[in-house]
Image: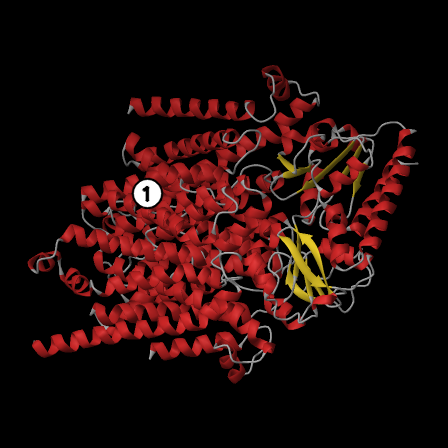
Amino acid sequence: MLASKQVHSLKRWGTLSLIALVILILSACGNGESNKGNTEAPAAAVKENTPAATVEPSTERTVKDAYGDVKVPANPSKIVVLDIGALDNLLELGIKPIGAPSILAAGDPYPAYLKGTEGIQNIGSVNEPNLEAIDALKPDLIIGNKDTHDAIYSQLGQIAPTVFVETLGVTWKNNLQLHADAVNKSEEGKKLLDAYQARIDQFKADLAGQDVKKVSLFRPRADKIQIYLKDTFAGTIMTDAGVQRVDSQNVEGFSKDVTEEQMTELDGDVILWFNREPDAFAKLEKSPLWTSLPGVQSKQVKPVDWEYWMSGLGIQAVNKVVDDLHSFLLK
Amino acid sequence: MKYRWIGLIFLSAGVGFALIASIAFGVVQVSVSSIINALCSFDGAYDQLIIRSVRLPRALIAAAVGGSLAVAGCLMQALSRNGLAGPEIFGVNNGAALAVVIVSIVLQSTSLSVFSWAAMAGAAIAGATVFLLGSIGGHSLTPVKLILAGATINLLFASLTQGILILNEQSLDTMRFWLAGSLTGRDLQLFVQVVPYMLAGLAAAFFLSRHMNVIGLGEELAQGLGQRVFFIKVLCIVVIVLLAGGAVAIAGPIAFIGLAVPHIARFLIGSDYRWMIPYSALLGALLLLLADIGARFVLPAQEIPAGIVTAFFGAPFLIYLAQRRGRTK
Amino acid sequence: MFLLLNILVLLLSIVIGERTVPAGEALLAAVGLGGDEYAFTVRQLRLPRALVGFLAGCGLALSGSILQIITRNPLASPGVIGLNSGAAAAVVAVLVLAPGFSMSRLPWIAFGGALVTALAIYQLSWKKGSSTERMLLIGIGISAMAGALITYLLTLGKIFRVSQAFTWMAGSLYGRTWEHFWPLLPWILLLFAALLFFTRHLDLLQLSDGAAVGMGIRLEWTRLILLLFSVGLAGAAVSMAGTIAFVGLMAPHMAFHLAGTRSLRRLPVAGLIGGLIVMSADLLGRTVFTPYEIPAGLITALIGAPYMIALLIRRRAI
């Protein structure tokens, strides 16, 4: 009895000391990490200790992103982008990133409207970029956005300096400028924006001479219809261009879900739609409510490419959208 | 005897009212006159189109799916002599979803009839697997084993579906569609395709109800009374597959109707299956219609899937049932 | 032996991946001596991810062990009785409705969700004497309600938030870092250490209530404290790794077969097995189907379901 009790307590101490040992080891190898990638203030701590970028101080610049000031290399040459907006913008600025993600699933091709994507390493999907693949590329700059990649921000910061825009879509002009700043092409960025403004002003002037056509924009999906309102990527461009939206869609906000019976809200003098699910529009088309819409009857329904109307989010996509608006609204 | 007829009439009236309410209420306001016009003198006006092409089919789908699920649950409970049997425990939903996903990938087909057949086959396979697993080991189906087998198969099939969708590069949106259990935007042609099977199933269930009473007494006794037990059991399973599989094929997973309704029916009129089956059919239709109406008004100007409503109110019923069983033991 | 297996899988976890790191290099990198080449991949990506998986597995396994002992029911586990879904609903609510909530406080939220669930179950079921059937049913009911609540919350939320919550719910260890590891560690360690002082109580509870009372144990109190431990362990694990299926059920079972009934041996073994399962599942999930990542929770379900079925077939009278 006594002996077994002793064995018992011996075992207990053995277990406890084992645990203690494990803690010690863990905290030993963890502490080194936690100084670098610490939990409390990842933004500040991470930036200082960027291990990969051993650049001279004189060749650094500072840009201001969604988290504050970031030091980036003067002329970054190995850039990894984490969203299609950045990929689009950088290509237009004449820079080919070394790594970029696919929109939906790892390994998918890049959007067809983007030229010159050959040789870019695929790094997973926009939602879950593969961190190991990014690290293996040894980038000197990473460009992402806070809305999608906030959770992996501190890890990315340890691979290379990171520049994050706040969000995607409505902020595309600021994003373009920040992307241009980050790669030391501020002037080119500004030129692109000016060119856009000139084009849009011309478009507005041309549009003024014509009958007003109200535009509807939505995305039919498997279980609902999603109306894209003013605070979307395409919505901001239409607002800039002075394009009139259908009254029920002329409101702030990102999107609004409607069911079949609210079909009147889809009607317009020009009806634009895009989606990624192939069957959803076919189903909509069969509904007698759809065929009863005046816009449908006068054959003003135009499918548009989701790759740049919805998921492009960069300057090339913007210009493609303006092209489309030209062909739909101007004669 | 008489009050049962009266109850049946009341329930039918209730279903009628719910159908009308389901047609009348929605995000878009529709006047009473256009409802009447839509049904009697249709002239193609937009409001009338809404009634005819959206609301009426939706109400009919809700009634058919609710009734079918309830009757399927009723037959399952009779067959397994187990008050906990129901489409959700038998893994019918997840089986159907898995089968549809596999078929749509392997055959590269988007044909609706293929989908509905796949859904029924999947439902049948899942149900049979759970039933077999639950009855393995000599003893007849014990509740615990049934529930365990059901929960396990459900999880396994759900995981497989999810895995296949991930590997097949589908977005989460597609998955959400399968998990939703919504009555909006359901395909009318699919409904038209499936509804004959469901009606046949319902008719067969009424025909079987007399035999179910005897089966409920136990196999030996039933055989003693001259029933062709095996034949009836097989028929019963076919009917269950038609009803539950059809319902899942149209509306996706609608939880707890098949489990809860037979209990409510039993509470109302006792355990005579000749009455339970019609009562279940009506009650199931009524409850799903009400849940679907409720789903339109939970959020302003936006709908939530009816399956969420039934789960939220059905689950406490399951818990209540569990407690009551414990007490009577 | 399990310690060795765990170390082996941990080693594999830091060696295998997008690009294979030589074992020696990986080890050096892990302790901070290697060159720059693999330091980040090993120390910032693979190591924390594997360790978070290990801790989460431990937590679920220990939680399941406690539950199986105090209910004297081999089927009790945090997943089965609905603790996991309760915790998940609470976390999704916070992720969707209160963006910017600090990560390190998430275990508390999950603990709160699991606690509410546990109290509900206690109120509904255990008070009136434990019955397997009732416990299972109530678990299914609670999981269904939590599931409905989660779906409802997801339709409310902003699109970016929702996709994050989705990934998290699938029980994926993607992007788990030291930021997840450090908040989780004290929960698991402290509760495990505390649990070791209750091994005698657990042993006695396993025999019968009478025996426990005879040895001077205050039954209700002990049960309540142990239940709280179990809730804390499961909640913390779920908060950092999402809902990972079947681990809380399988690991205690295996531990029972391998290490017997003595809690002092059974608990650590269960914890190690649980950690082993989750870590291996994550390793498989991220390497087998590259470039796709299969969430660890999905892999454990694919392993766990057949295990469960085998159990059903073999044990004729559950």
Residue at the spot 10% in from the left edge and 79% down from the top edge: A3
Q: Quadrant of residue B282?
A: top left
Residue extending furthest toward the bottom? C24
Residue at the spot 23% in from the left edge and 53% down from the top edge: C225
Q: Quadrant of residue B189?
A: top right
Q: Would residue C87 appear left or right of B185 to someone viewing this image?
A: left
Q: Which is more toward the observer, B263 or C214? A: C214
Instruction: Give the mark count.
Output: 1
Q: Would residue A6 appear left or right of A143 to someone viewing this image?
A: left
Q: Would residue C219 appear left or right of A242 to someone viewing this image?
A: left
Can residue B142 be seen in the rendering of this structure? no
Q: Would residue A72 appear left or right of C51 to someone viewing this image?
A: right
Q: Residue C152, how many percent across, how many down? A: 49, 40
SS of the residue under disc 1: helix
Q: Which is more toward the observer, B72 or A268? A: A268
**Image vertical order of residue B252 relative to residue C171, above or below:** above
Figure quadrant of the N terminus of chain B:
top left
What is the basis of the colouring in this image?
A: secondary structure
Q: Which is more toward the observer, B235 or A183? A: A183
Q: Residue B39, how many percent across, how many down? A: 61, 21
**Image vertical order of residue C8 relative to residue A243, above or below:** below
Q: Chain of mark 1?
A: B
Residue at the spot 46% in from the left edge and 60% down from the top edge: C180
Q: Residue A16, how many percent across, how many down? A: 26, 72
Tell me the kind of residue under disc 1: Met
Mark 1 burial class by Cα count in 10 Å: few <14, some 14-19, many 20+: many
Residue at image mark 1: B212
Q: Residue C118, how many percent across, how many down? A: 30, 48
